[in-house]
Image (cartoon, grey):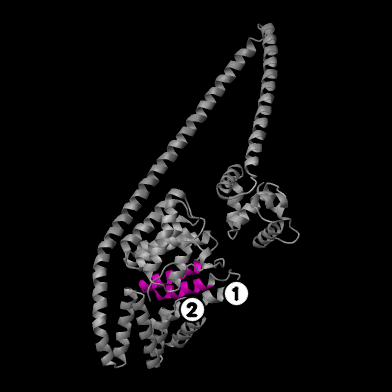
Amino acid sequence: MLLGSVACSDKTEVRTVDELSLHKRSYILFNDGAPIDTCIAMQRRAVDEVRAGTSDEDPVDVLSQLGFFYTRAGDYRNGFELLQEAADYRLAHGESKGTGDIKLYGNLSNLYCRFDMLDESFKMSDAAIAASLKNNGRLLNDLYRMRAMLHNKTGEDDSVFHYYELALDALKDKDDESYKNMLAVGINSDKGGWLIEHYDRYPDSLDRAVGYVEKAIATGGRDMTMERFMLGLGYVRQSRVDEGIKLMERSLSEFEESCDDESVAWATQWLMTVYSETGRINELARMYPRYREVNDTILNREKLNALIASDVKWRAEQKEEENRMLNIELSSARQRLFMVRIIIVLVVLLFGAAALYVRQRSKSARNKRMVMQQRMEELMLTQKQLNGRIEALSEELLNAAHREVVGNVSRLLVPSVLSGEDELKFRKSFAALYPRFLLGLRHDYPSLTPNDELVCMLIYLKQSTDEISLCLGISRASVNSARYRIRTKMALSKETDLDEFLTSRGA
């Protein structure tokens, strides 16, 4: 079976398509079997938004997904460029909070596997699994499925079975039973397809494998072209030849319609094998020219891929060398910092010793300078009192200035009717004074709309229902409806006061 990408198997909040970002919409298109060029076109727009700074999506995730789409289309050079850009962004900005790192490493593992760079592929697979475990196991079942196929490429059947079992075990912490069952069906379907493909090694598992794939097709929920092809092959192995070949031929046509040359070549080879085994000479003769054509295309692509693979290997080695040099520089910097700290400690000790020496000298001469010392003490006391008064006056001035600034900003934060530029100014002023409030809301409650945010901001500023109504140019009833809608999205209990809850978030 063909090695896929990191699938987004985390359950996503249910929204209409128009409410989703370009990044998420392009993934839905891909998962529904849309032509890869369509997915690439939409994802390129998502990348443009990221580069322009107008997207709320994780840049690592967005860049990685376009890189995967390119590699799926056979454009490995552009695919590697996008994945490398994602890796550079991560290096510059630190770890991704979402699934960006997981998908980046997973897709790099796939790309390296494609070029038979298996050591690098396993290394990236390990990094993806580690990132998933740090992120509460998100996408872990997908990573284990991919790892099973990676071990399939190295001929390690025991590891293939092991990682399929780990993929199923990774689902145990998911709360939604129906969703968990759907993912388990997909994992078992992959395992069943692998068993069917390797029927000669595991003939006793054929009926169970066919059952897995049949259940996946009955469950549906995504493009099932690959599953139908494997089911057809399974039927042929069960001596249901006509039924099986019909499914395989249908799937091949669907691969051709989606311009998936790689899948077409793979499916054509299997179908010709079945034609040969079942004595269908006419069908075999009819298929052969198409087989030659596709394989010539794949062969030419493989020659190009060999050049690209060399380039990828060279770049990977260069990047590894850059990272090694960077680590050396960081190590040297740490050593220099350590030496600086030692010097600072020595200087402090030196000044301390000097101060102690001066103090002892002063103490020995105190009797001779008693009168002068008393006058100096009186002068110092007066100076301290003066300094204390100056500090008190300075603090009063600062407090008065702060109250004036806050008052001015608060007045800016409560315009009469928020719309257009006024709303933009309001948001900027609010963000300047309370920078963490909106960031926290968006992180914890991503389903809030811009209007919901405005209502929350006005509530946080202790505006009454009438004042909010005036600011937004809506009725009291609409304000109350907005409050109810916000409470619902935040899943607040009846006992929780919305105003107090929002006020506490800004503390």
Q: Which of 131 and 43 is in front in this view?
A: 43
Q: Nearer the viewer, residue 234 or 69?
A: 69
Q: How far apart are marks 1 and 2 (CA)?
A: 16 Å
Disc 2 marks which amino acid?
Asn
Within-10-Å neighbours for mark 2: few <14, some 14–19, many 20+: many
The location of residue 394, given as percent across then percent down, is 65, 25
Q: Is mark 1 on a helix, strand or loop?
A: helix
Give the magenta range: 140-168
The location of residue 365, given as percent across then percent down, is 63, 9
The location of residue 191, given as percent across then percent down, is 45, 78
Q: Name the residue located 63 percent from the left edge and 11 percent from the top edge.
A: 364
Q: Which residue carries the number 2 mark? A: 188
Q: Which residue carries the number 1 mark? A: 177
Residue 261 vs residue 409: left or right? left
Q: Name the residue located 35 percent from the left edge and 81 percent from the top edge.
A: 253
Q: Residue 372: within the magenta?
A: no
User: Can residue 122 be seen by looking at this rendering?
Assistant: no
Q: Residue 146: within the magenta?
A: yes
Q: Name the residue located 54 percent from the left edge and 66 percent from the top edge.
A: 12
Q: Which of 343 and 323 is in front in this view?
A: 323
Disc 1 marks which amino acid?
Glu
Residue 482 vs residue 52: left or right? right
Q: Which of marks 1 and 2 is in front?
A: 1
Mark identifier at residue 501:
none
Q: Which image quarter is the N terminus in?
A: bottom left
Residue 498, by quadrant, is bottom right
